[in-house]
Amino acid sequence: MSANPATAPVRVLEWVRYPTGVWNLPRSLAHGLAAVVPGVEVWCPETRAEAEALLPQADVVLGFIVRPENLGAAKRLRWIHSTAASATHVLFPALVESDVTVTNARGLHADAMVEHALAVMLGYVRQLHVARDAQLARRWEQERMAATGFGSLAGATLGIVGLGAIGSALAQRARALGMRVLAVRRRPAAAPAVAHEEWPVARLPELLAQSDFVV
């Protein structure tokens, strides 16, 4: 979004403040938006009280400051962007009924989530958790691990519950490793291109019964 230089700048209020800080947007990147997008002014308040005070002047909110009790004060607000894949925790009835546009970050986390899921599955079939614990205890567990048996993702069945951006990316990569992929979703595709089969949610018990792994 850019503003006409002859008019007031578009004012973006950034408020992503998770206690651990792991999901927070670095201030340098937030402030850098103004340098690359003409006509945009970015605010990154330090406290919720400061964010609340700035909200009535904001055109755009990046994050999670808007709530039912302060929406009425946001007279200039036109757009809220959630940095999460979902927008459900941002929405509430009055906001849904308003003219404010709400967007989310759907697909942003797909690669990270998919690689993590595959890493866990690979670690399990290759017994990396057993090898790790044995190494820490200075034990040689080769015979016990061989007796238990090493598995393989190739030929295994992966069940995916929900086939959005993350599920679709996982299905694609799992098939490349030779896995059979089943998926349940609210609106199954007539000719699935990502999973081997797409089923309605009512067939979830069947998917669970057939799957070696479920994501």
Image (cartoon, grey):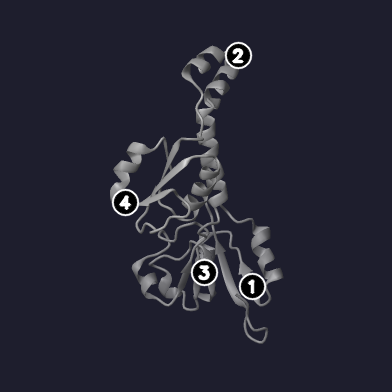
Marks 2 and 1, the one that precedes in the sequence: 1
Quadrant that contains the C terminus: top left
Q: CA distance from mark 4 to mark 1?
A: 45 Å
Is disc 2 surrounded by few (<14), some (14 to 19) or many (20+) residues within 10 Å?
few
User: Percent from the top left, x then y, of residue 157?
Assistant: 43, 38
| Kind of residue sitting beneath label 4 | Val
Marks 3 and 2, the one that precedes in the sequence: 3
76 shown above or below 176: below
Is disc 4 surrounded by few (<14), some (14 to 19) or many (20+) residues within 10 Å?
some
| Kind of residue sitting beneath label 1 | Glu
Callout in the foreground (2, 1): 2
Q: CA distance from mark 2 to mark 1?
A: 58 Å
Residue positioned most to the right = 35
User: Percent from the top left, x then y, of residue 60?
Assistant: 54, 72
Work out whether residue 104 can be spotted: yes
Check residue 53 in the rendering and tell me which mark sits there, or answer none: 3
Marks 1 and 3, the one that precedes in the sequence: 1
Q: Residue at x 54, y 58 (%)?
A: 16
In the rendered view, does 128 fall on the left or right side of 74?
Answer: right
| Kind of residue sitting beneath label 3 | Ala
